[in-house]
Every structure is written in structure tokens, then in C-alpha cells.
Image (tube, rainbow, N blue to C red):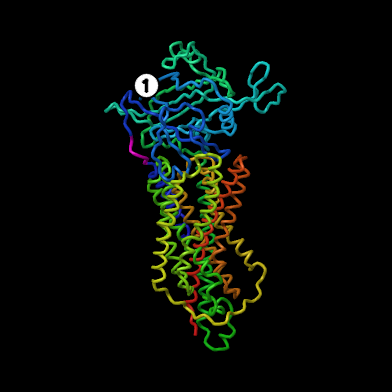
């Protein structure tokens, strides 16, 4: 009955956290009220592709550009993501429909410009624009799990498309049909129909924009000659003649010497969607049951491990302690076996103890950073409306949590009787960040060579270096100083001067098998949620279910702690006192499974053919796996460290 009540309570907590995630992280920024006929300018963000993962500035292609290109103020996260928000020639008058507005005319496309357009179109680049802090999106009607047709958004719209054309009659040929007369051509989407959804305030006659939709077209515009740049008269798109752009119009081919006219329509549609809910369609998911399955799967793992640990604690361990404390005669004590037999070596500092202290401190830093970031996300401060907010918060908190790194590593270094705390502090401040810096700098150099906006500018690069050397490193030193000055608790038992020989172990108690098995369950607790995280990172989708992520993260920490404690107990029972490093690697090995899953995701879900993009994926996957390794390893080690101190402090020893 009690276990049933516990399961129900856990389920209610999970539901509450997911509800919190749904309710509080979409406040966005302050709403903007527009009067009728107010002029609103669309902004351009970047060109992006899931095939190359290399963003480019909008004006890296020969699109129509204003006389003066103005860059919007961007936060650190936007810069790291490759966003370069700029003004454009696309304007609209609030609640005033307009058809066939001409942006500009390119008199003759040069060979170089034609090649640029063709390459971006073949790489499936999409145009990212912003209106009133809403990203442009194309409408996609999908069916949910109940078979209902729902409206979803696909971010951006394609620069163009590639199609097969019959050489004889210029008719379209389906992509999967082989035809000897087929010719592959590239076409440019030079006309866009924007649909602006607005919610009207009846009392004040003002409106708020609640949707920004786009439908691209490719049309070979013709016009009455001579062409007037101030008032051009188009024959292919003329509201006065009731002529509008359709998919039946001849498309605009991309080739040298072509004349291209860029046009757009603006249609305003009233909507019942309120401003506070305008992000719902962007964030709508059709597979919510998978997240619940992920949570249930993780809970089953945690309940299984909790049962195993509970069995050890409440039955086996209590029986052992009672038995050891009842041994009175020297003969009985000489015949003792099990984990008490290694009491004189269990607190012997391991080899490379300083490295272990640095890794544990780094894991504590990563864990605190992730926890605080998650709390801010659940509170609504890092909603998708706050572009780059999640990335900015993660970087700043990682830097600030350098204090935790220094304190934990310094305190543990003193616990293992380390002699040179200054050297340990230097390693904590620079060793692991140096690995990240080298990988990041190498990737940034390759991206910069591609002239991608994803390359971090020199100013931002030096800002990151300043945050490392000027903020994070001093905080590590401060934390390490306080950690080494703080008193540490004495070991429950004395350590022998001569190490005890470890008896020969059975094959399944070898380090390899114990570490390999230990990482399976922590990875199993998060692998379903990991799919959605990778999808949001590499397929440019929004990830916003922070409530479910918080539950999964909590279960991950519990799983790491329990599996490490359980395997540490089995190791001590086998009279092997070398538990320090193994307790770290036991849970930390889940990072290897994470890396392997990332490789599987790359080969099955992504269509990346660019070598630079491949290097980007595996470079960032290596960084992520390394951070995950330190986090899970630190959780497992700290749990085992506390467990060992508790059990050896509970027995009578001479």
C-alpha cells in the first residue's frame, strides 16, 4: 500500500512539473500595440540549412538590400548561434493588405551571383526573418496522435528549389521518375506571400501581431516597358487587373544573365489567438505521449535501482553491520570477511588523486550550471521568445559556477591529503576549459574559413577569453582557497601504512565490465529525451518542455548515485578497496553511450554531406559528452564517497 502511494505521489509531482513547464516559460517580451496603418519593418536574421549546419548572413546572397544595413543589438547567445539581425526593405502597413509590392529588380544576374544562389538552393537553405519578435514560418497541416488535423509551423521558407524539367515542352517531371529528356534546373523563390495574424483590441482599436506566416513562390515576372523603378507595372502580378501570383506561373530560373524582380504580398487575418499564446503554434508537438513514455521509462529504472539499493541498505548492510559489531574474540575477528576486511585501505588516496579532484569539481560546476539554468527556464526567463537567452544563461552560469568547481576540488584535495593545492587549483581552472577551448577554436577557424555567420567574431571571442581568465579562473581560486581552509571531517577508520593485496577477482568484477554495465542504466533514463534535444539543436526546432527535462534530469542524478553506490558495495564485498576511480567511471561511462547514440543519430537522422559540418557535429558532440561525463561521474563519486564514510562509521573497529 505504501509503495502504491509513493508511485501515485511521484506521478503527481511529474504532472505538476510538466504543468509548470507549460505554464510559465512563455511570457516573452513586452507586447507591442499597433494602430491601423502603422509602418512595421520586417527584419532578416540569417540563412540556415539542416544539411550544412552553417548559417550565413541574409545579405551574403544578392538579395535586395537597403541603402544602409543596420545591425540590431544581439546578446551573446544570438552571436554564438550565428544570428545576424539586420533591417530590410520589406515593410507593411498595419491591417492594410497589399499585393505585388516590388522590392527591387536585379538587371542581370552575374555568373558568380548565379552560382551563389544555386549552391544555397541545392543545400536547402531557408530564409529566417523576424516580425515583432516572431520568426517567419510556413504552415504545415499534420495529424496528431488522435488523427485530428492540426496546424503546425515550419521555421523559415526556402530560398528556392531544384526540379526536373522536360527539355522538349518544359513540363515538370516528378523527382522519382527517370526520363531521358529530363533536365535539372534551379529556381528562385522571388515572391513571398506574407500572412500576418493579428488580435484586435475592440476597446482601444489597437492590434497585436500573433502570427507571421509565409508562402514562397517562384515566378518569372514580366512588366510593361519601359520599367519604372518608382511605379513599376507588372504583367504577372497586378491587383488592378485581378492578376495574382500562382503556382501555375512560369518559375524564375537561376542562371547568369537572368533579370529578377523580387516582390511580396501582405495579407492581414484577424485571429482569436491572444498575444500571450502566440507561441503555441510554434511550439506545438504531435508526439507528447513519447515524452510521457520517456518519464515512465526513467521512473521504472529508478524504482528498480531504488529497490536494489533499499535491499542492500535495509537488509544486507544492516545484517553485515550487526554481524561485525558482534565479533568480540580475536579468533572471530581474524575470520571476518567482506567489506570490513578492507577498512585499513578503503580511505587510502588513489593514484592521480589530484586529477580525480579536478574532474569531480568540474562535474559539480556543470551540475550547478545546468540546475540553475533549468530553474530559470521553468520560471519562464528563457522562453523561445527571448532569442539566445538559453545559450547566454548557460555560458554566464558556467563561468559563475567556477567558484563551486574550486571549492569542491579544493575541499576534496585536502580530504585526500594533497600537498600542492595551488597546482590543483590551476588544473581545476584551466585543464578542462582548455580542452573545450581548443576544440571550439578549431571548429570556429574552420567555420570562419567558410565565411559563415556561425563563426564567432573576434570581439566575442575575446569576450569569452575574458570571461574565462578574468571571471571564471579567479572564482575557481577563491573557491579553492575557501575549500582548503575549511575543516574536513576525519576518516572513520585509520589507513594502514602497507596496502593490502587485492585478491584475484572473478571476471565480471573486472573494471571493464563493471564500468560498462554501470553506464547503461543512467543512459537508459535519458536516451528518449536526448533524441528531442538533438533534434532541437541540429534540425532547428524549438525545445521548450523544461518541466519534463527537469524530471528526467532528477531521475538521471538518482540513477547515477544508486548504480554507483550499488557497484561500490559489491566491489568492497569482494575485498577490493580501489573504489575511488571506479565509482567515478561507473556512472561517468554513460557518456560513452551518449556519444555512440549521437553517432547513430548523425547517420540516421541527418543528411550532412559537408566535411566542415561533420566536424562541427562530432566536435560539439565531444564537448557535450565530456561535460556529461564529468557531471554523471561526479554525482556517482560523491554518492559513493558518502556511502563509504557512512558504512565504515557504523562498525566498531580497534
Q: How many marks?
A: 1
Q: Would you say residue 29 sits in the magenta stretch?
A: yes
Q: Is residue 135 left or right of residue 522?
A: left
Where in the figure is residue 302, as x and y percent of width and height?
52, 58
Q: Would you say residue 454 sits in the magenta stretch?
A: no
Question: Is 485 above or below relative to 396?
Answer: below
Residue 510 image-quadrant placement: bottom right
Residue 152 seen in the current view? no
Question: Is 458 above or below relative to 504?
Answer: above
Label 1 crowding class (10 Å Cα cut-off): few <14, some 14-19, many 20+? few
Question: Is 392 above or below relative to 113?
Answer: below
Q: In the rendered structure, which segment of residues is drawn in magenta?
A: 27-31
Q: Which of 48 and 586 lies nearest the eye of the viewer?
A: 48
Is most of the magenta stretch helix, strand or loop?
loop
What residue is shown at x 59% (from left), y 29% (from top)?
115
Where in the figure is residue 594, as x and y percent of width and height?
57, 53
Q: Which of 236 and 18 lies nearest the eye of the viewer?
A: 236
- Most extreme residue toward the bottom is 330
What residue is shown at x 44% (from left), y 65% (from top)?
408
Residue 160 image-quadrant placement: top right
Where in the figure is residue 531, as x and y percent of width and height?
55, 46
Reading the image, the residue beneath label 1 is 96
Where in the figure is residue 580, as x and y percent of width and height?
54, 69
Q: Which of 574 and 440 lies nearest the eye of the viewer?
A: 440
Amino acid at each position: 500500500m505504501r509503495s502504491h502511494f509513493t508511485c501515485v505521489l511521484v506521478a503527481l509531482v511529474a504532472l505538476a512539473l510538466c504543468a509548470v513547464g507549460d505554464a510559465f516559460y512563455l511570457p516573452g517580451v513586452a507586447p507591442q500595440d499597433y494602430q491601423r496603418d502603422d509602418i512595421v519593418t520586417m527584419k532578416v536574421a540569417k540563412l540556415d540549412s539542416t544539411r550544412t549546419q552553417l548559417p550565413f548572413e541574409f545579405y551574403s546572397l544578392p538579395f535586395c538590400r537597403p541603402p544602409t544595413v543596420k545591425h540590431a543589438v544581439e546578446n551573446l547567445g544570438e552571436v554564438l548561434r550565428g544570428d545576424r539581425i539586420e533591417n530590410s526593405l520589406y515593410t507593411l502597413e498595419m491591417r492594410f493588405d497589399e499585393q505585388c509590392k516590388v522590392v527591387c529588380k536585379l538587371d542581370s544576374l552575374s555568373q558568380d551571383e548565379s552560382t551563389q544562389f544555386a549552391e544555397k538552393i541545392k543545400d536547402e537553405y531557408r530564409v529566417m526573418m523576424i516580425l515583432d519578435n516572431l520568426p517567419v514560418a510556413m504552415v504545415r497541416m499534420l495529424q496528431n496522435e488522435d488523427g485530428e488535423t492540426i496546424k503546425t509551423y515550419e521555421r523559415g521558407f526556402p530560398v528556392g528549389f531544384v526540379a526536373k524539367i522536360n527539355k522538349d515542352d518544359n513540363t515538370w517531371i516528378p523527382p522519382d521518375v527517370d526520363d531521358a529528356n529530363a533536365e535539372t534546373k534551379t529556381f528562385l523563390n522571388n515572391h513571398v506571400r506574407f500572412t500576418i495574424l493579428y488580435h484586435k483590441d475592440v476597446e482601444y482599436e489597437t492590434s497585436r501581431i500573433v502570427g507571421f506566416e509565409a508562402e514562397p513562390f517562384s515566378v518569372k515576372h514580366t512588366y510593361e516597358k519601359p520599367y519604372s523603378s518608382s511605379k513599376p507595372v507588372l504583367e504577372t502580378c497586378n491587383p488592378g487587373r485581378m492578376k495574382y501570383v500562382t503556382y501555375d506561373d512560369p518559375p524564375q530560373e537561376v542562371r547568369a544573365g537572368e533579370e529578377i524582380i523580387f516582390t511580396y504580398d501582405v495579407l492581414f487575418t484577424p485571429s482569436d489567438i491572444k498575444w500571450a499564446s502566440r507561441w503555441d503554434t510554434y511550439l506545438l508537438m504531435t508526439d507528447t505521449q513519447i515524452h510521457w513514455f520517456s518519464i515512465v521509462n526513467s521512473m521504472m529504472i529508478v524504482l528498480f535501482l531504488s529497490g536494489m539499493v533499499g535491499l542492500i541498505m535495509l537488509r544486507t548492510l544492516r545484517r553485515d553491520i550487526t554481524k561485525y559489531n558482534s565479533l568480540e574474540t580475536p579468533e572471530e575477528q581474524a575470520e571476518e570477511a567482506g567489506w570490513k576486511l578492507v577498512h585499513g585501505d578503503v580511505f587510502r588516496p588513489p593514484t592521480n588523486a589530484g586529477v580525480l579532484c579536478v574532474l569531480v569539481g568540474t562535474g559539480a560546476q556543470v551540475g550547478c550550471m545546468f540546475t540553475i539554468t533549468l530553474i530559470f527556464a521553468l520560471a519562464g526567463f528563457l522562453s523561445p521568445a527571448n532569442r539566445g537567452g538559453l545559450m547566454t544563461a548557460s555560458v554566464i552560469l558556467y563561468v559563475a559556477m567556477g567558484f563551486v568547481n574550486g571549492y569542491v576540488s579544493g575541499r576534496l584535495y585536502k580530504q585526500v591529503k594533497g600537498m600542492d593545492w595551488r597546482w590543483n587549483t590551476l588544473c581545476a581552472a584551466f585543464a578542462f576549459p582548455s580542452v573545450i577551448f581548443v576544440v571550439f577554436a578549431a571548429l570556429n577557424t574552420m567555420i570562419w574559413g567558410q565565411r559563415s555567420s556561425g563563426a564567432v567574431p573576434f570581439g566575442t571571442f575575446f569576450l569569452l577569453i575574458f570571461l574565462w581568465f578574468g571571471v571564471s579562473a579567479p572564482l575557481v581560486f577563491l573557491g579553492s582557497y575557501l575549500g582548503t581552509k575549511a575543516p574536513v571531517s576525519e576518516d572513520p577508520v585509520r589507513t594502514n601504512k602497507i596496502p593490502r593485496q587485492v585478491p584475484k577477482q572473478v571476471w565480471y568484477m573486472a573494471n571493464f565490465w563493471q564500468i560498462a554495465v554501470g553506464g547503461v542504466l543512467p543512459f537508459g533514463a535519458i536516451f528518449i529525451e536526448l533524441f528531442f534535444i538533438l533534434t532541437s539543436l541540429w534540425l532547428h526546432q524549438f525545445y521548450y518542455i523544461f518541466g519534463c527535462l527537469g524530471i528526467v534530469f532528477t531521475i538521471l542524478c538518482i540513477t547515477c548515485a544508486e548504480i554507483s553506490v550499488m557497484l561500490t558495495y559489491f566491489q568492497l564485498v569482494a575485498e577490493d578497496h580501489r573504489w575511488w576511480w571506479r565509482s567515478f567511471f561507473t556512472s561517468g561511462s554513460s557518456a560513452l553511450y551518449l556519444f555512440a547514440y549521437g553517432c547513430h543519430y548523425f547517420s540516421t537522422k541527418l543528411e550532412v554531406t559537408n566535411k566542415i559540418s561533420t566536424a562541427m557535429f562530432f566536435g560539439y558532440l565531444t564537448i557535450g559528452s565530456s561535460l556529461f561525463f564529468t557531471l554523471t561521474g561526479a554525482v556517482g563519486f560523491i554518492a559513493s564517497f558518502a556511502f563509504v564514510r557512512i558504512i565504515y562509521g557504523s562498525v566498531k573497529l580497534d
